[in-house]
Image (cartoon, helix red, strand yellow):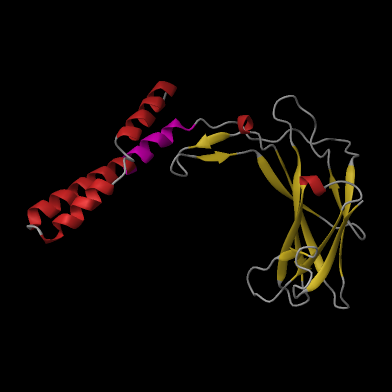
Amino acid sequence: MGSNGCRRLLEMCGKVCFRPEADIVRKYRVLSFSPGTRMNNSLHALLMRTGSAIAFMGAIGGCTHEKDLSPPPLNLSPGNVLQIGIHADSTSRYTARLVAQYGNLKGECGYVDYGKALGGAMVLPKTDIPIAQVGDAFPVYLDRYAERQVCPWKLLGVGIDVVAPNGRTAFSGLSSRDLRAGAQKEVICNFSRSDVNSCLAAAIYPNSPGVRVSISVR
């Protein structure tokens, strides 16, 4: 569908599809003890307008113009690396898994997918890369991808799963501002749940129950 057609659809929907239904709901309440014919007319109007919104969503899906979200080529000689160490203050054996996220979060590098949500959902170029532990740390490269002029990719953050001896996991991570040599983060990880657990910042929740874990960047 062309851009003019999409624009016209959006304008039409603003006038018809998503107009507040308060007036119809109000009439429905007033007519709830009226003859069935009048009540059915109100319900019919409500259903017709709801159907218009659903039909609009199907039509506007054709307005999505996908962009190429593929990453740049890999850097053949990466050298700018951060070593991320994860240590649990416990006599028991705790392990960790780390995933590095790369991409570009600028709006002009993605596109709006009108078929995913009302009003559209932003789709941005990014991907998660599992990082294997080497020795006592996880090597994460800042220059994993080659430079390019349009929509270059960079390291956005890392996600960390701390794994308890019983197999339960707790989630933590580092944002892009923490990904610098010398950064330190202390968290307290609680493994009380069998499904999803999290690690809280020790500086904010110093008395939280759990295992204290140190995350360092060098």
Where residue 121 appears, as percent x and y from the top left, is 52, 41
**Foreground of the two, 195 or 76:** 195
Instruction: Name the magenta segment's main secondary structure.
Output: helix
For the N terminus, the quadrant is top left
- Say if 70 sits above or below 187 in the image: above
Q: Is residue 24 left or right of residue 119?
A: left
Q: Residue shown at 45%/39% (left/top)?
A: 119
Q: Which residues are magenta?
A: 54-64
Q: Is residue 85 left or right of residue 151?
A: right
Quadrant of residue 74 within the rendered picture = top right
Quadrant of residue 2 within the rendered picture = top left
Quadrant of residue 95 within the rendered picture = bottom right
Q: How many marks?
A: 0
Where residue 80 appears, as percent x and y from the top left, is 89, 40
Q: Is residue 14 left or right of residue 36?
A: right
Q: Residue shown at 38%/31% (left/top)?
A: 10
Q: Residue shown at 51%/30% (left/top)?
A: 65
- Say if 10 sits above or below 102 in the image: above
- Say if 148 sits above or below 112 in the image: above
- Say if 168 sits above or below 83 in the image: below
Where residue 89 appears, as percent x and y from the top left, is 87, 72
Q: Is residue 199 left or right of residue 139?
A: left
